[in-house]
Image (cartoon, grey):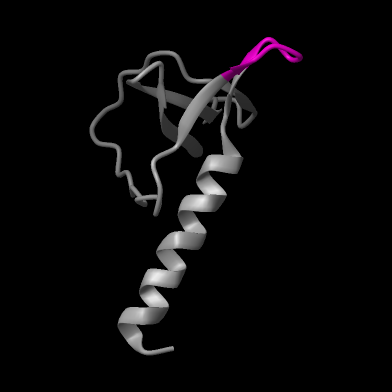
Amino acid sequence: MLSLLDNLALDQGKPKVHAHVVLGKADGSAHGGHLLEAHVRPTLEVTLVESPAALVRRFDRETRLALIDVTRWRSTIRRKWVWIARVTGR
């Protein structure tokens, strides 16, 4: 596994992983796409970074996709930064 990027967002109130992967093949080439299921060995090291706000997916009628609601995320981020500024005295 050369790269694994994903997000964990709430979709209809339930956590859902959306992952992209790039895999190295024996011939030195690479293949990438959505990761649906995987088995790794001997280990896979993963670093998780917690978002300051919960990511929530909402169905978008125009694209017909469940997209992350960035407007809600941005307003939550602003509130958190204001709170941090007050706590630190800035």
| x and y, in percent, of residue 32 in the image | 61, 25
* Quadrant of the snapshot with the N terminus: top left
Q: Nearer the viewer, residue 8 or 55?
A: 55
Q: Residue at x 54, y 22 (%)?
A: 58
Vertical arrangement, residue 23 with respect to residue 2, above or below: above
**In the image, which residues are magenta?**
59-65
Q: Nearer the viewer, residue 21 or 79?
A: 79
Vertical arrangement, residue 43 with respect to residue 19, above or below: below
User: Taking 7 as reference, is 15 left or right?
Assistant: left
Q: Which quadrant of the structure image shows residue 24?
A: top right
Q: Which quadrant of the structure image shows residue 9?
A: top left
Q: Is residue 88 visible?
A: yes
* Quadrant of the snapshot with the C terminus: bottom left
Q: Is residue 1 visible?
A: no
Q: Nearer the viewer, residue 73 or 17?
A: 73
| x and y, in percent, of residue 13 in the image | 34, 20
Q: Is residue 69 magenta?
A: no
| x and y, in percent, of residue 72 in the image | 53, 41
Q: Residue at x 30, y 19 (%)?
A: 39
Instruction: Identify the residue at the far bottom of this view.
Output: 89
Vertical arrangement, residue 63 with respect to residue 31, above or below: above
User: Taking 26 as reference, is 43 left or right?
Assistant: left
Q: Is residue 63 magenta?
A: yes
| x and y, in percent, of residue 71 in the image | 60, 42
Instruction: Identify the residue at the far right of this view.
Output: 62
Instruction: Identify the residue at the far left of this view.
Output: 42
